[in-house]
Image (spheres, rainbow, N blue to C red):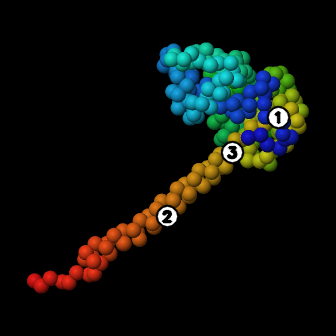
């Protein structure tokens, strides 16, 4: 979610809605898996199920790309991979810097999916002098004093912030001043950026809290269902003890 910035129109320059843009990576992930299994074509229903959306929404999304598939055949997997990759700007390598090489930053640096998805970790940056020069995922950590030079030397336009909350805004300001125009923020705080800079926030605690809400709701529904079942069972038990006219039958002598 974008935060701390003036709202801009919810469309891209080619008229693709932001909601569709947000689903394109889901389609690309599903298509890449099919491509790796050498599946040549896929129906809208199969691809929608793999991406977790309904097929009508998928067909509408693909219409923005000018891709309509072939009736009775479906969509060409390799062509769709190319189309979506091109639309997302993944036909080139994007240099990325990660600022904040604590546990989370180091885990991100070690993530092997960047290269296969069009991204290259150009530099790892941290304020701790003890980390300077130490390799993480084969890349030596550089000090934040050199942040601006690192950005300029590597032509970086995408920055990842994995610092503590208190340092995130200052790091963000320096990244933006150095020319970074897109930021992925893992710090648990809202960043303020000028218009023209895009921020995506990843907050694991918020996602867990949302899951906790759903778990609580499900537990409440189960408790309510069990409570409703008790009177019904009791009523059935009372009627079973009654005679045909509703009277309690007399005890038969032994």
Image location (x, y in percent) of residue 254: 10, 83
Q: Earlier in the sequence, mark 3 or mark 2?
A: 3
Q: Earlier in the sequence, mark 2 or mark 1?
A: 1
In the figure, is residue 158 to the left or right of 103? right
Position above or below: 185 against 70: below
Secondary element under disc 3, as helix, strand or loop, is loop
Which quarter of the picture shows residue 145? top right
Residue depicted at 69% across the width and 21% down the height = 65
Answer few, some or many: residues within 10 Å of disc 2's Cα (few below 14, many 20 plus, some between 14 and 19). few
Q: Earlier in the sequence, mark 3 or mark 1?
A: 1
Q: CA distance from mark 2 to mark 1?
A: 44 Å
Which quarter of the picture shows residue 21? top right
Report the disc number at residue 9.
1
In the figure, is residue 225 to the left or right of 169? left
Residue depicted at 62% across the width and 26% down the height = 59
Q: Which residue is labeled 2 in the image?
A: 224
The front one of 148 and 209 is: 209
Answer few, some or many: residues within 10 Å of disc 3's Cα (few below 14, many 20 plus, some between 14 and 19). some
Residue depicted at 86% across the width and 28% down the height = 179
Secondary element under disc 1, as helix, strand or loop, is loop
Residue depicted at 29% across the width and 78% down the height = 246
Which quarter of the picture shows residue 247? bottom left
The front one of 37 and 48 is: 48
Q: CA distance from mark 3 to mark 2?
A: 32 Å
Q: Quadrant of the N terminus?
A: top right
Q: Which residue is labeled 3 in the image?
A: 203
Position above or below: 231 against 142: below
In the figure, is residue 247 to the left or right of 33? left
In the figure, is residue 228 to the left or right of 78? left
């Amino acid at each position: 979610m974008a935060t701390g910035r003036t709202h801009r129109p919810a469309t891209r320059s080619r008229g693709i809605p932001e909601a569709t843009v947000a689903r394109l990576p889901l389609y690309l992930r599903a298509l890449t898996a099919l491509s790796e299994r050498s599946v040549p074509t896929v129906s809208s229903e199969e691809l929608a199920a793999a991406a977790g959306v309904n097929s009508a929404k998928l067909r509408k999304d693909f219409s923005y790309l000018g891709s309509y598939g072939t009736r009775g055949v479906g969509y060409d997997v390799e062509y769709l991979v190319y189309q979506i990759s091109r639309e997302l700007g993944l036909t080139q390598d994007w240099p990325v810097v990660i600022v904040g090489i604590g546990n989370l930053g180091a885990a991100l640096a070690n993530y092997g999916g960047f290269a296969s998805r069009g991204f290259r970790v150009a530099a790892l940056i941290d304020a701790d002098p003890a980390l300077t020069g130490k390799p993480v995922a084969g890349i030596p950590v550089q000090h934040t004093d050199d942040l601006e030079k690192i950005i300029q030397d590597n032509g970086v336009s995408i920055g990842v912030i994995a610092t503590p909350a208190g340092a995130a805004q200052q790091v963000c300001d320096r990244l933006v001043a150095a020319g970074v125009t897109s930021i992925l923020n893992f710090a648990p705080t809202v960043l303020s950026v000028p218009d023209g800079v895009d921020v995506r926030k990843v907050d694991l605690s918020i996602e867990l809290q949302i899951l906790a809400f759903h778990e609580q709701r499900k537990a409440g529904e189960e408790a309510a269902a069990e409570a409703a079942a008790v009177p019904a069972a009791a009523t059935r038990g009372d009627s079973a003890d009654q005679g045909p006219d509703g009277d309690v039958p007399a005890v038969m002598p032994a």
